[in-house]
């Protein structure tokens, strides 16, 4: 089902991509690394993804009373695989020419796991730290987030469909409880098993569910915020929270954790309160 175009979401995507690129560019001013929290660009994408997938599924369920898994997954495959395969084909000859045998073997494994949308497991169990220098030799390290997203896309539509059809009035309660549990697991894991917290779905799901909850309320109410004053002020606060996170977060902090609420709330404020006629949205 086609969604209404929202330019502010494209703006958030641009911020997310820019944040990740700046993070990996290792820019320093007077010896101090800037944009050291740019890794939160991934978290921004997760909220957007949760919002969009839930909007699509709920609107189809409400309109037709059913949901086509076949059509949904066909669209996902058409959208993801061509670009992923192209990157793999372009990367392969360079890896063959320049990588030593052991690195090429690791590279080949990462391709296979990426195609199976399970590279997050591979990079966790291989001990790969995101942002580490040797990550430059793992061009598919960034597919870990795609794997998390696709795992969510496999499980969540099934859970959402069952809940909608059999206990619809409890749907929002289930989404909120799921978010709280996942956030709690992320907080605990980030302090005890940081790699698990970073790479795995159960500690990232709360970010996706934040977007799902926004979609639920938008569809249930039939609109987002209509408060002009809030629509004027809160997107700016959301943008500030995101910018503050990009500049002041760093690799030493626990992440994802309660700290990560800052950019997630920022993204949520922009999605819920943005109005195309307001200046902050146009920016």
Image (cartoon, grey):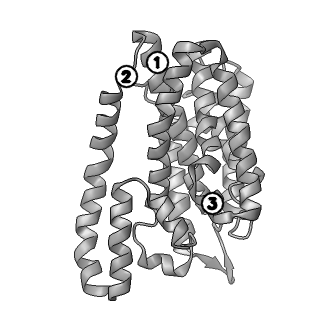
Residue 59: mark in rendering: 1
Mark 1 or mark 2: which comes first in sequence? 2
Residue 196: mark in rendering: 3
Q: CA distance from mark 1 to mark 3?
A: 34 Å
Residue 274 visible here:
no
Q: Position of residue 278 (x, y in %)?
A: 61, 30
Tag 1 and tag 3, C-beta contact below 8 Å: no
Is residue 237 placed above or below 58 in the rendered structure? below
* Helix, strand or loop under label 3: helix
Mark 2 packing: few (<14 Cα in 10 Å), some, or many (20+)?
Answer: few
Quarter of the image where one finds residue 100: bottom left
Mark 1 or mark 3: which comes first in sequence? 1
Mark 3 packing: few (<14 Cα in 10 Å), some, or many (20+)?
Answer: some
Quarter of the image where one finds residue 131: bottom right
Name the outermost residue toward the bottom: 100
* Helix, strand or loop under label 1: helix
Q: Position of residue 244 (x, y in %)?
A: 72, 56
Which residue is denoted by mark 2 in the rendering? 1
Q: CA distance from mark 3 to mark 2?
A: 35 Å
Quarter of the image where one finds residue 175: top right
User: Residue placed at 43% from the left, 24% from the top?
Assistant: 4
Q: Position of residue 10 (x, y in %)?
A: 47, 41
Tag 1 and tag 2, C-beta contact below 8 Å: yes
Residue 144: mark in rendering: none
């Amino acid at each position: 089902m086609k969604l209404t175009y929202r330019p502010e979401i494209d703006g958030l995507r641009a911020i997310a991509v820019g944040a990740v690129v700046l993070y990996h560019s290792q820019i320093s001013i007077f010896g101090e690394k800037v944009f050291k929290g740019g890794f939160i660009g991934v978290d921004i994408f997760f909220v957007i993804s949760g919002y969009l997938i839930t909007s699509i599924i709920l609107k189809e369920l409400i309109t037709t009373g059913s949901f086509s898994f076949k059509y949904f997954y066909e669209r996902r495959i058409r959208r993801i695989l061509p670009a992923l395969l192209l990157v793999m084909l372009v990367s392969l000859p360079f890896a063959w020419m320049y990588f030593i045998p052991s690195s090429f073997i690791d590279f080949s494994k990462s391709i296979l796991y990426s195609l199976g949308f399970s590279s997050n497991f591979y990079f966790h169990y291989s001990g790969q730290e995101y942002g580490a220098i040797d990550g430059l030799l793992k061009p598919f390290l960034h597919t870990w987030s795609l794997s998390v997203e696709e795992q969510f896309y496999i499980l969540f539509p099934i859970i959402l469909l069952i809940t909608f059809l059999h206990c619809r009035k409890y749907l929002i309660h289930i989404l909120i409880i799921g978010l709280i549990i996942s956030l709690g697991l992320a907080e605990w894991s980030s302090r005890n098993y940081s790699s698990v917290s970073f790479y795995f779905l159960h500690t990232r799901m709360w970010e996706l569910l934040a977007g799902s909850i926004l979609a639920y309320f938008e569809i249930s109410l039939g609109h987002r915020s209509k408060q002009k004053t809030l629509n004027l002020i809160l997107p700016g606060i959301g943008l500030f929270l995101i910018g503050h996170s990009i500049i002041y977060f760093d690799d030493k902090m626990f992440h994802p954790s309660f700290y990560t609420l800052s950019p997630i709330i920022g993204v949520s404020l922009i999605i819920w309160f943005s109005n195309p006629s307001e200046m902050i949205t146009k920016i």
